[in-house]
Amino acid sequence: MLKVKYLRESMIASKILYRLASIALVATPSIALLALSSSVQAQTSAPGVTFEAQPDVTDPNNVRPLPQSNSLLSIQGGKNLMDEANKAVNSQNYPVASKKLQDARQVFNQLSNFYQQLSASFSGIDNRYVETNRRKALETADLRDEATYQLALVHRAQNQPELAVPLLIQIIRSQNPTRPLGKKAYQQLFELGFVETAYPSSTPPPSSPPPAPSPR
């Protein structure tokens, strides 16, 4: 009987020790976490230690200029796309070049429209802002037409004249046939066989007939 009683007491003691060990294992991470939290609080509240607050991007008073080096909605952003397209053309990766030029064309077109709208908004208020934004509108329009011309060349390299012709006509309408880019676009139309007469023509244009005399 004494032996049986001793065994029961030993088993009870073992269970108690096991439960105590389990509690210690669970409590240890919590104690460590509390200690780490206290340490962080002590560091953040230590005198002489300051932390730079991040600006609130939702605050309407937080006005910051667009980063021109990496912003897509900028002249430099559009030029970066054209540079990437040029690299793709050099490696004959025409699908990538086409996509980059389409994106650049869209960026420059949006910028040109925005600057034109700003120019019109200041009409009658301050001519300085009218002229400044008008020059920007013309500059970005020229860049848009240049991207369009490069895109037309990529379509031609892919034997897709049906895609190149509309772009070339858009350039001529925007630039005027007498300007350098307009002449280059018309030359492409001539080489594609879309037009039959080169411009400028080697023969002088026919002179207009003299006006008929007015009746007396």
Image: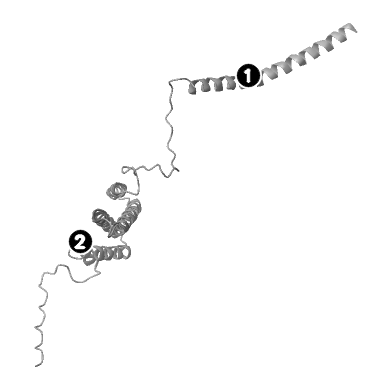
Q: Vertical placement of 29 versus 132: above or below? A: above
Q: Residue at x 80, y 10 (%)?
A: 10
Identify which residue, 100 or 94, lies in the foreground. 100
Q: Which mark is residue 184?
A: 2
Mark 1: which secondary structure? Answer: helix
Identify which residue, 178 or 153, lies in the foreground. 178
Q: Can you tell which quarter of the image residue 26 is in?
A: top right
Q: What amino acid is labelled 1 in the image?
A: Thr
Q: Vertical placement of 94 versus 60: above or below? A: below
Identify which residue, 147 or 210, lies in the foreground. 210
Task: Residue 93 in the image: state x and y as whole percent.
Answer: 32, 50
Compare marks 2 and 1 and give the one earlier in the sequence.
Answer: 1
The residue singled out by tag 1 in the image is 28
Q: What amino acid is labelled 2 in the image?
A: Lys
Task: Residue 100 in the image: state x and y as whole percent.
Answer: 34, 51
At label 1, counting other C-alpha atoms closer than 10 Å, the crowd grade (few under 14, some 14-19, many 20 or more) is few
